[in-house]
Image: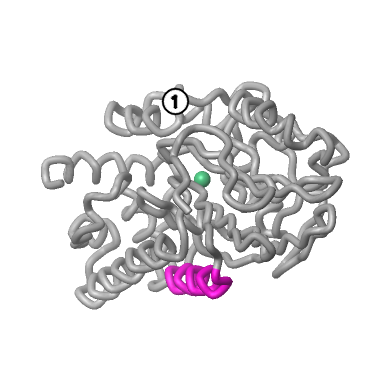
Amino acid sequence: MAIDYTRGLHEVGPDVWAWLLPDGEWGMSNAGLVRGVDQSFLVDTLFDLPLTTEMLDALAGLVEAAPIAGALNTHANGDHCFGNQLLGDDVKIHATRDTDHEIHHGTTPERLQMLVSSDFGPVTSEFLRSCFGAFDFEGIALRGADVTFDDELTVDVGGRAVELLRLGPAHTAGDAIAHVPDAKVVFAGDLLFIGGTPIMWAGSLENWMRACDRMAALDPDVVVPGHGPVTDVDGIAEMRRYLAHVTEGIADALAAGRPWREAADRMDLDRFASWPQAERIVVTTYHAYRQAVAGVPAEDGVHLFGEMAAWRQRHAGRR
Ligand SMILES: [Zn+2]
């Protein structure tokens, strides 16, 4: 089934919709809706209140007779949960325990606002603004989960089963997906980027590849990624190939005794070098190194964005 990659609502299965936000760049994330007989279930809110309001307004007709009663935050990055406060108090928000913890202790809207409005030097600041400058972080009050789970939880959505499966840690500590077996649809959150480069804030790469295998084993007809166009199992397989390629590159760099910055800088990304946001290899390499070897100093987010910006600049002519 070919689904157009245009902004807005797309039916991807019987009474299952994806909300798509091209071009899938930083913060431009997808969400979803599953509708049962008398209630509906939302997969993720969006990065700011205007984006989430636009989506909820577009869903209003669909959920009139089957109101949204539950939701999942696939993970704690703001582009998947900063709109939570716009869901009514009666909407039960679900998340893994790790995601709920990260919503309350991770990057806040105030910090993102500070990142785009402060001066970290021209290269870093220009990059941060290109990532986050288009969003409106005003008025966001963090809201976490009402229901947490560790491994899996099946929710009854007006007579339909929606399986919430924790497959992280990978992109973040608590990544979960929503699987709608009767429609053969998987909402992958940021365990899947399509038409862009994945970024690993937690890891491991091995567990992320296992997550890909588990998603593929569900044998879905339709897979909605956290960013990018709707895909199927081929999209999962392609991203798994990227992860396997990077795993190999990092193993080679470790064997050669390269520090992580050099490993990221010299990594031969092969055909994946042309993927948008190729500079995310910096963050993925950093976290892979932190897990593989002792003594890699901790870096804060500003430094990692600075490193990505510098990588991007150095490689601009080479791609
Ligand atoms: Zn995202």
In front here: 93 or 304? 93
The colour scheme used to paint the residues is one colour
Asked if residue 53 is positioned above or below residue 303 in the image, the reply reads above
Query: Which segment did they paint magenta?
Result: 204-219
Determine if residue 138 is in view: yes
Asked if the beta carbon under badge 1 is closer than 8 A to the nearest atom of ligand 1, the reply is no
Find residue 73 and report its horizontal and vertical position in percent.
67, 49
Residue 105 appearing in the image? no
- The answer to whether residue 255 is left or right of residue 297 is left
Q: Position of residue 189 (x, y in %)?
A: 55, 53
In percent of the image, x 45 and y 55: which residue is there? Answer: 231
The number of callouts visible is: 1
Give the residue drawn at x 25%, y 41%: 310
Give the residue type at disc 1.
Gly
Mark 1 = which residue? Answer: 133
Magenta stretch, overall SS: helix
Q: Nearer the viewer, residue 106 or 15?
A: 15
Question: Which residue corresponds to the image point at 32% horizontal and 53% vertical from the top-left?
Answer: 282
Q: Is residue 53 left or right of residue 303?
A: right
Please give left or right for residue 308 compared with residue 299 in the image: left
- Give the camera-side residue of 186 and 258: 186
- Residue at horizontal 79 percent and vertical 41 percent from the top: 68
Q: Secondary structure at mark 1?
A: loop
Q: Is 254 above or below relative to 155?
A: below
Q: Quadrant of residue 56?
A: top right
